[in-house]
Image (spheres, rainbow, N blue to C red):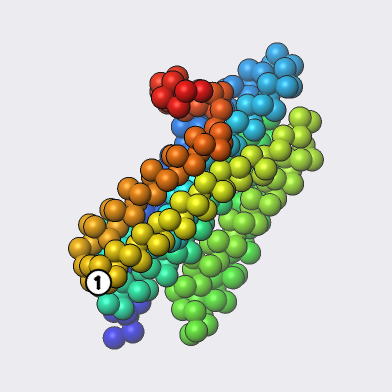
Amino acid sequence: TAQKAATTLKGLYNMAQTIFNMPCSFIVPITVSIIPAITSYLTLDDHENVRETEESAARITGLLSLPCAVGLTVLARPVMALLGGYEGEQLELSAQFMTLLGVAVFFQSTLQFLHAVLQAHGFVNIPVIHMISAGIVRMALVYIMVGNPALGLLGAPIGALIGLLLIMVLDLWAIQRKVPQKPKLLKNLLRPAIPALAMGVVVFFCYRILVALLGIDGSRVLLAGIPIAVGVVVYFVCVVLMKTITRKDCLLLPKGEKIAKLLHL
């Protein structure tokens, strides 16, 4: 029945959303740590350290969110097969949801960071206004696209992606207008992009090779686990070789001193 099909689709989308929320939660410790740091520097009227802290936090946000976004986008099918246990048409649909939400991981993580910057500077109402404005646009888009038979429930993640992008643009614009230090946030957010893209290419071909060897319905653990493990190694090596992260960046992370020593920073 139509109701049963709708319930099934909603269940697939909810599962993709649950996986989407996992990497975004990694950004919370960063937002928690930068607000008091920025506030203390503002109290001391130390604008140089305010800017450096914000740019450093932007690099860390990109460092964590970009590989997650690329990985979930490239490995949407094996990840949903492993974690959701789906197969056939359900797997294909859930993989489409995950591909779109994978891209949205970067935008959602960036928003959490940008909101923290605005709040640290005392502009607590601006993120709320932006979220309400973009939320109205998102609801209108989702209503229109989900009602289109060619898109169906795919309109929900597309609408979410557009809404998040809109809020991110508004937040960046507000920071450039309101924050006197004019930190280069977007540039630093995208600094880990090359290592993340390199990882994505390697992971893509690794998965394709495994599919050729094991078959598309081979071991779900191997089809998802091996590319993820290879991707972690490739990304780590690229980050170190390209000096994408600095010692000050590491200190914003839990156990940052140990991470800095491990990376010889």
Q: Is residue 244 above or below residue 204?
A: above
Report the front residue among 123 and 32.
32
On the image, which quarter does residue 259 sit in?
top left
Occupied quadrant, residue 49:
top right
Instruction: Please state the total of marks drawn on the protein image.
Output: 1
Q: Relative to the observer, which residue lies in front, 152 or 240?
A: 240
Residue 80 left/right relative to 126: left
Relative to 90, residue 165 above or below: above
Q: Position of residue 196 (x, y in %)?
A: 50, 49
- Residue plotted at (49% across, 42% down): 238
Q: Quadrant of the N terminus?
A: bottom left
85 relative to 109 in the view: left or right: left
Residue 84 seen in this snapshot: no
Q: Which residue is mark 1?
A: 215
Q: Position of residue 143 (x, y in %)?
A: 54, 73
Residue name at image x 45 percent, y 39 percent: 237
| Coordinates of residue 61 in the picture (x, y in percent) | 54, 39
Tell me, yes or no, if residue 38 can be seen here: yes
- Rendered residue at 29%/53% (across/down): 226
Circle 1: element type: loop
- Circle 1 Cα neighbour tier, 10 Å, few/some/many (<14 / 14–19 / ≥20): few
Residue 104 vs 148, above or below: the answer is above
Seen from this angle, which residue lies furthest top? 44
Along the horizontal axis of the image, is 234 left or right of 42? left
Q: Is residue 212 above or below residue 110?
A: below
| Residue 245: % across, % down | 54, 32
Q: Amino acid at mark 1?
A: Gly
